[in-house]
Image: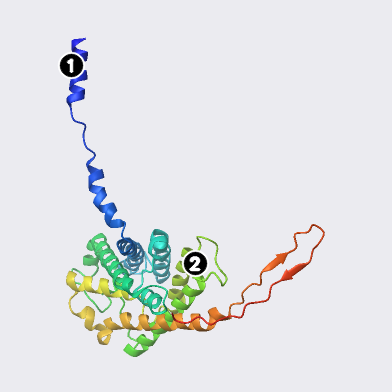
Amino acid sequence: MESEKHLSTSAETTPRPTMAPVHVLRPMQRILQKEMVRECLAEFMSTYVMMVFGLGSVAHMVLGQQKLGSFLGVNLGFGFGVTMGVYVAGSISGAHMNAAVTFTACAVGRMPWKKFPIYVLGQCLGSFSAAATIYLLFYSAIYNFANGELLVTGSKATAGIFATYLPEHMTLWRGFLDEVFLTGMLQLCLFAITDKDNSASLQGADALVIGILVCVIGVSLGMNSGYAINPSRDLPPRIFTFIAGWGKEVFSAGDNWWWVPMVAPTLGAYIGGIVYLGIIHPSIPRNPQRLENSAPGNQNVTVSPKVPLTSVTST
């Protein structure tokens, strides 16, 4: 009895262990209650997921010398990487994963400009982190591929794993126009896919269709400039390669090509968005409302007059 009493007393006097994780998580939860923080983290994670799959597929093609990967594999990697990114954060931030798409959303009034730097920050950090991850995962293969050299151009170049570079048959301004057109097609189709007044896809299928869109752009039009079509996809990994040892040539190669994947996609996305909102969206027929008589024997249907369509402005 005394031993039982002793055990009971010691159990009462022994302090219960505190749940440390709860105290750690509370400040984090308070931070995550802020909308812009959630959206920045969502863009970070979605872009990271997209870029890991995309850059990983390029690494297989380059380092495997077309034996372990292919250009089709790259398109599938980026396409389904986009799909996974949308599933990761689509309901939080919309999973733009693309500074040109974010710019267009702000420019046409679908998103306030104050969110633009927050979205782009998350995208760039996610893209940079993905480049670092792929570098670490393929570190040995990258160094063995060119006997320890980190080359930007030539048959043994590995900088192209991380960023786009012009092929020999392209000039700077042809590449610029190529990026404008491709990103314009991307943005136009994005607006079409997400426009519920148009031929809306099945609920939850938007992510898959958007991934297929990216894959189709790469398969059909990606040869000339590598279809960066995304400033957030190209510049952060390029900066990483500069830091990791590829040197200043990552910026000077291709007649200083580095700025084109930032400017041309932004311009192209805006043009594509304006084309859709200015021409296609206002032309979508609105279904007339049907009012059926509730009387059992009356099968007459009254059709309400159509409301005149109004053009969609940029605001």
**Residue at (35% x, 63% y) in the render:** 46
Q: Which residue is mark 1?
A: 6
Residue 140 in the image: state x and y as whole percent: 22, 62
Residue 79 in the image: state x and y as whole percent: 42, 67
**Residue at (29% x, 69% y) in the render:** 118
Of the pair 261 and 60, the residue shown nearer to us: 261
Nearer to us of marks 2 and 1 is 1
Q: Is residue 215 left or right of residue 242?
A: right
The amino acid sitting under disc 1 is His
Of the pair 286 and 86, the residue shown nearer to us: 286
Sequence-first disc among 2 and 1: 1
How far apart are the two marked residues, 2 and 1, measured between alpha carbons?
Answer: 68 Å
Location of residue 107 (image quadrant): bottom left
Q: Is residue 206 visible?
A: yes
Location of residue 284 (image quadrant): bottom right
Give the image's coloring scheme: rainbow
Secondary element type, mark 2? helix
**Residue at (23% x, 61% y) in the render:** 136
Location of the N terminus by quadrant is top left
Whether pointer 2 and pointer 1 mark residues with C-beta atoms closer than 8 Å, the reply is no
Of the pair 87 and 222, the residue shown nearer to us: 87
Secondary element type, mark 1? helix
Q: Is residue 84 visible?
A: no
Label 2 Cα crowd, 10 Å radius (few <14 / some 14-19 / many 20+): many
Of the pair 183 and 243, the residue shown nearer to us: 183
Q: Is residue 299 left or right of residue 277?
A: right
**Residue at (82% x, 59% y) in the render:** 297
The amino acid sitting under disc 2 is Val
Residue 50 in the image: state x and y as whole percent: 36, 65
Q: Which residue is mark 2?
A: 209
